[in-house]
């Protein structure tokens, strides 16, 4: 039987391009929140999969041998999203790793960012990337991490921000961090690196740095991009422009959402150059120059203007998602936290709230009213590191036949940290 890959993030910019390459050699299961709306191809099977759901993720990976993980969660995933992208990414990675173990996946390939030698004061984004890498491998599946700095392509995240700054500013104010070096790499070279890593024993449980032919400062990238665009770009060095001010300035000028810009700009204070000791010939050494990759990206951007894309449709979003992280007491686990939380809720809000427990069904009540505000039903516990209450009724919940509202408690492998998450909760009143 041919090797079969499950691709998470198949409708994203990198995922879409990677899918086109992978299907030349492999059968691919393309995972998307709205996969049922897409047509299968000769070697591509689309499956709807909400990666926030462990059950969905397990079902989505069924039948795969290798799994590719291209998922970030910087943008809100519900009408009301509460919680940081770090906690969202941690939860998604934990689901993916658990599902990989359940399906006997023999390798996870993960696209991350280049990590500087000094890891003490990492930006939120890079710290989260490292955490995701660790959790993906926490259940025994070998992980191959491809680490890239700025990926040059017409979409994605970092390069479009840089190109918009060059296009829209008559004069470029350059903060101190623009003197830091990075290692840009063209999108086709990233796709090549990911594809070359599939099912190779010598790259399992390894982090591999990749980069283009040249490392350069952000200032050099800005000036080269301006030259390619035919712009004479005067620059002013402003060493007092802090990262916090920079991210606000970049957001305003680029028009990109702050959820994307803030973490990326914060990461630019680090030198992000590929480490020769973490490079592998044939995978790490990108061949396309920065100048050529910029020309290709700008040309593709022009060609795409005005063209409609089926992947641009906005997926149906649910009402409420909340993801928080707490620290468990020593020798306690997620199952204990799930039970303790219900007791704490009534004691915290006494005398306004009280809770009752009967046959794994918890009712949250107010005084002198028989019907509960919320009814929660605990699912059977598979292991003490994860417990789930389904939202099954109550005045404050709109529960239909196919409702999937739930509260999850899960312990992060190897730590006393616990994620408490509310998913797909549809309130019956504001």
Image: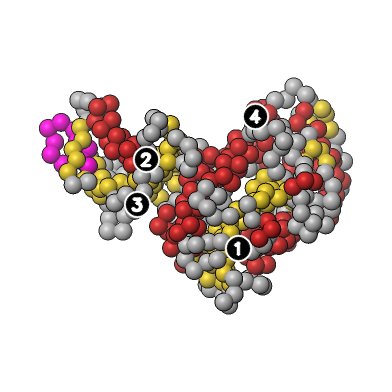
In the shown orientation, is residue 194 left or right of residue 231?
A: left
Q: Which residues are magenta?
A: 362-371
Disc 4 crowd rating (10 Å Cα; few below 14, some 14-19, many 20+) is few
Taking the magenta stretch, the answer to whether it contains residue 367 is yes
The CA distance from mark 1 to mark 2 is: 43 Å
| Contact flag, marks 3 and 1 (Cβ < 8 Å) | no
Taking the magenta stretch, the answer to whether it contains residue 40 is no
Disc 2 crowd rating (10 Å Cα; few below 14, some 14-19, many 20+) is many
Q: Which residue is mark 1?
A: 309
- The quarter of the displayed image where residue 190 is located: bottom right
- Per the picture, the main secondary structure of the magenta-coloured stretch is loop
Q: What residue lies at 55% left-to-right and 58% top-to-bottom? A: 8
State which mark lies toward you, 1 or 2.
Answer: 2
Going from N to C along the chain, the mark reached first, 1 or 2, is 1
Q: Which residue is mark 4?
A: 121
Q: Which residue is mark 3?
A: 382
- Percent position of residue 196, x then y: 71, 62
261 is higher (above) or lower (below) than 400: above
Q: What residue lies at 50% left-to-right and 37% top-to-bottom? A: 84
The CA distance from mark 3 to mark 2 is: 12 Å
In the shown orientation, is residue 374 left or right of residue 102?
A: left
Q: What residue lies at 47% left-to-right and 62% top-to-bottom? A: 103
- Percent position of residue 26, x then y: 62, 71
Is disc 4 placed on a helix, strand or loop?
loop
């Amino acid at each position: 039987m041919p090797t079969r890959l499950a691709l998470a993030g198949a409708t994203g910019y990198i995922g879409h391009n990677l899918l086109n390459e992978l299907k030349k050699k492999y059968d691919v299961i393309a995972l998307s929140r709205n996969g049922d709306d897409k047509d299968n191809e000769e070697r591509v099977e689309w499956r709807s999969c909400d990666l926030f759901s462990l059950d969905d993720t397990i079902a989505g990976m069924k039948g795969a041998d290798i799994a590719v993980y291209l998922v970030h969660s910087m943008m809100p995933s519900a009408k009301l999203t509460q919680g940081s992208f770090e906690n969202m990414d941690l939860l998604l990675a934990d689901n993916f790793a658990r599902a990989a173990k359940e399906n006997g996946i023999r390798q996870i390939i993960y696209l991350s960012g280049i990590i500087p030698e000094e890891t003490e004061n990492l930006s939120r984004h890079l710290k989260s990337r490292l955490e995701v890498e660790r959790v993906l491998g926490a259940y025994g599946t070998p992980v191959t991490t491809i680490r890239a700095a700025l990926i040059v392509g017409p979409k994605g995240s970092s390069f479009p921000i840089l190109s918009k700054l060059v296009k829209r500013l008559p004069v470029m104010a350059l903060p101190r961090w623009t003197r830091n070096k990075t290692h840009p790499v063209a999108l086709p070279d990233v796709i090549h690196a990911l594809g070359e890593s599939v099912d190779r024993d010598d790259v399992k449980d390894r982090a591999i740095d990749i980069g283009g032919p040249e490392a350069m400062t952000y200032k050099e990238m800005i000036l080269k991009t301006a030259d390619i665009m035919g712009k004479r770009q005067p620059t002013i060095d402003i060493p007092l422009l802090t990262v916090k001010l920079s991210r606000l300035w970049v957001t305003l000028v680029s028009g990109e959402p702050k959820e994307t810009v803030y973490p990326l700009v914060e990461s630019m204070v680090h030198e992000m150059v590929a480490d020769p000791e973490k490079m592998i010939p044939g995978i790490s050494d990108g061949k396309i120059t920065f100048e050529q990759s910029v020309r290709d990206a700008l040309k593709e951007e022009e060609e795409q203007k005005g063209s409609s894309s089926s992947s641009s449709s906005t997926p149906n979003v649910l009402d409420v998602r909340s993801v928080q992280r707490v620290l468990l007491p020593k020798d306690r686990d997620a199952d204990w936290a799930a039970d303790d939380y219900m007791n704490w809720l009534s004691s915290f809000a006494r005398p306004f709230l009280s809770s009752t427990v009967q046959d794994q069904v918890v009712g949250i009540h107010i005084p002198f009213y028989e019907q509960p505000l919320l009814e929660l039903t605990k699912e059977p516990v598979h292991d003490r590191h994860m417990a789930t209450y389904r939202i099954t009724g109550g005045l404050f919940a709109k529960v239909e036949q196919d409702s999937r509202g739930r509260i999850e408690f899960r312990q992060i492998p190897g730590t006393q940290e616990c994620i408490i998450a509310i998913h797909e909760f549809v309130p019956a009143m504001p």
